[in-house]
Image (cartoon, helix red, strand yellow):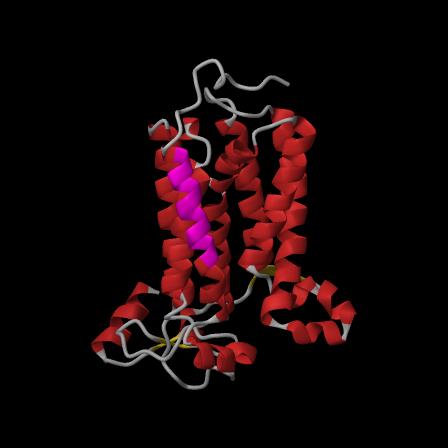
Amino acid sequence: MLSLLAASQAAAEPIYWSDLGLRPYLFEIGGFQLRYYSLAYLIGIIFAYWHLSRMIKAPGAPMAQRHADDLFFYCMLGVIIGGRLGYTIFYQPGIWDNPLDVFKLWEGGMSFHGGLVGVLIAIGWVSRRGDLSFLRVCDYIAVNVPMGMLLGRLANFVNGELWGRPADVPWAMVFPDARAGEIARHPSQLYQAGLEGLALLVILLLLFWKTRARYRPGLLVGIFTIGIGIARFVNEFFREPDAQLAEFAARTGLSMGQWLTIPLILTGLIVTIYAVTRKPVGTKAAKPATA
């Protein structure tokens, strides 16, 4: 792959995605394909459960393992149901003309904002049932989300979908989708993987494991919300708007993703200010929860 990149840059020609030898599935048996997008969801959820189980063993945990088990189940439902409903409501409402199409998850179409709402509802449900601090549970969940974002955007790139706007940068790519045409474009999936995924993951892991941020309720989730909001807002300048929303973006000056991101950033700022202006959780209150 690196040789192809270097050759394309030397010739001042765009990189052709089809020359990278990528395909949307890991393997195929009969009519079954293990697709990278499904694998990204699976690995992201497994990582979140494994890492959350490690986090609650550290001092200051606001929950026990049984709560983590409940969160694993309900948050998974929240991501799937919320993500799909969010996509059909904000990005492709025409799907509701045939309601059964809403359930065709294998055809793609998930919204980050919808998934976020679904996860918040799941956290609220588990927190209320377990008499847990909603903000502190959100802190612990937020640290794990960027891994899923990283893997999901890499899967988008491997699928050759969600490509960017036309570009003349040396790393611009021509994607195989007929709608993209023979036009060199930003590989915006990789930009998103780097900012929304890798960068935010590193920041939150360092804050959790190397500082006492987890003792300030709301700080980690506030930083996550600001970070994901800014990263998404910036990346939308490079990402091609969904075909059915191109007119909306041209008319309003911002894409649907950017409009939905503005309240996200503002909410993150409010939560972060709240967290840093309150006293940290005391030693006694910060003892790990017991099963």
* Quadrant of the rendering where the N terminus is positioned: bottom left
Query: Where in the figure is residue 127, as x and y percent of width and height?
Result: 63, 32
Give how far across and how far down residue 26 sits, in percent.
Answer: 56, 59
- Between 233 and 39, the residue placed more toward the observer is 233
Main secondary structure along the magenta-highlighted residues: helix
Residue found at x 43% / y 15%: 283
Image position of 34 (left or right of 280): right
The residue drawn where x is 51% and y is 49% is 148
Q: Which residues are magenta?
A: 263-275
Q: Is residue 154 in view from this perspective? A: no
Q: How many marks?
A: 0
Instruction: Please state if 77 lies on the left or on the right of 198 as rendered.
Output: right
Instruction: Determine if residue 252 is in view.
Output: yes
Q: Is residue 218 above or below residue 146?
A: above
Q: Quarter-wise, where is residue 28 in the image?
A: bottom right
The image quarter in which residue 168 lies? bottom left
Q: Height in image: 76 above or below 69?
A: below
Of residue 57 and residue 99, the one placed in the foreground of this image is 99
Kindly identify the residue that appears in the image at 52 percent across and 75 percent down. Answer: 242
What is the quadrant of the C terminus in the image?
Answer: top right
Compared to 205, does 267 lie above or below? below
Camera-side residue: 285 or 32? 285
x, y (%) of residue 113? 55, 57
Q: Nearer the viewer, residue 51 or 126?
A: 126
Q: Is residue 115 magenta?
A: no
